[in-house]
Image: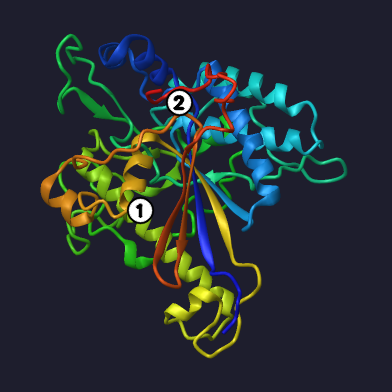
Amino acid sequence: MSSLPPFYLRVILVRHGQSANNALVESGGWPAYYKNRTADAPLTDIGREQAKRVGIFLSKMAKESPVPIKRFYTSCMTRALETSSLMYEASTSLNGRNSSSNNDVQGDVQGDVQGTVQGDVQGAGASTDGAGAGASTDGAGAAISLLPRPSVFVDAFEIGGLFDKRPDADMDREPDSNTWIGISGLSREGVTTLFPAIDLGDESRPPILPSSTRATTTFIPDGSSSSSSSNNQSSTTTMFSPYTTGVLSKQGWYMSKRKEDESEGAARTIRIVEAFKALAVSLLVNERGEGADKEVKKPLGVGVTPDGSQVKKHDGEAIILVCHGDFINVFLRACVSDPSMTLEAVESKGGRGEGLQFAVNNCSCSIVDFLPGDSTVRVIRINDVRGVADVELEVKELLTGAPR
């Protein structure tokens, strides 16, 4: 029996930096948030600083990581796209190949996002010519990041989706389901213009979605109800949610005309957790080489295939996912087998369940390993804020987004 360590997939969940909406909650409470929120809020100055710091933190982590960070995904919400772009540029600057990028990216992204995103958020496409957060370039003296170039993971949006208040909504009353209307979000052109550091490539869907994790829904533009994949109401089958097509298009990415409810958001997040588990199995199968038996057995967890041959000495890979606070809460609850965070529970009882909750700060890191050999889920860190603030020295002004 080989002594090789078990193969695993590491997922590094990073909450976005402080957004304008987060700042509203912290300064004026939830009434101020509901009355003055921005549908697709950009980062604050604090949020931009947090993003740069966590980019440097993860770049240093990447140098000593037991598994290589090979992929970097981000939600399509503006606050996540901006966070990811700043993280990537900070990593580039840290590597010493683009000394001006750290200052340039703050000014470029801040100016472009604040001046353009509200006009583009309905999906019409951005129109600015700003440089934005530049991506790696080719040739001599090219900027090189220690982190992979970020790409979009459309379905990793915050629970609730992308929504704004209806024009006739009375915001002096307690909001309800009739208060909000869904909006489509940044278009593909808008993301390219505002955030050129984001790699859209030829296809915007990340390759982590095995068919076994498909939601039994079809895309329903008005978001009024869900249906099985055999229903003919629509021909576009989604992976995780009935409210997106799973890709970033010229129309945007959030296709519902209403806010996602909590049980739908929880179910979507749980399916994403299951997709990561399936990806871990798929990666391990690929490590064994083409033509190998695809049945995964427990001995694989100690580095041995069923036929007795060893897997490669490299024992896994890591993925960064820049996402959102409520999304991370449900993700972690599903990982620790919270009985209220199963598909059956959220679909039958509604909501996000009672009891266990994980509060995470802006730009904190939570790390989970998926070990396909014996189906273990290993939680490594929760709400690690070392990349944002020095807690021991009481430098806490950058700790936002969760109770202290």
Image location of residue 351, percent across then percent down: 18, 40
Extreme-front residue of the structure? 392
- Work out which quarter of the rendered image holds the N terminus and state it: bottom right
The residue wearing badge 1 is: 335
Q: Which mark is residue 283?
A: none
Extreme-right residue of the structure? 140
Residue at image coords 51%, 18%: 44
Q: Residues within 10 Å of mark 1 (few under 14, many from 20)?
A: many
State whether residue 179 is above or below residue 252: above
Q: Residues within 10 Å of mark 2 (few under 14, many from 20)?
A: many
Question: SS for tag 1?
Answer: helix
Extreme-bottom residue of the structure? 307
Q: Earlier in the sequence, mark 1 or mark 2?
A: 2
Image location of residue 97, percent across then percent down: 81, 37
Q: Report the mark closest to the observer, 1 or 2.
A: 1
Q: Amino acid at mark 2?
A: Asp
Query: Quarter-wise, where is residue 287 in the image?
Result: bottom right
Q: Amino acid at mark 1?
A: Cys
Image location of residue 392, percent across then percent down: 57, 25
Question: SS for tag 2?
Answer: helix
Residue at image coords 42%, 16%: 23
State whether residue 279 is above or below residue 157: below
Q: Is residue 384 left or right of residue 251?
A: right
Residue at image coords 16%, 41%: 224
- Dots 1 and 2: beta carbons under 8 Å? no
- Work out which quarter of the rendered image holds the C terminus and state it: top left
Q: Is residue 241 visible?
A: no
Per the model, the C-alpha gap separating discs 1 and 2 is 36 Å
Judging depth in this view, the residue of 394 and 259 nearest the camera is 394
Q: Is residue 300 visible?
A: yes
State whether residue 45 is above or below residue 186: above
Q: Which mark is residue 120?
A: 2
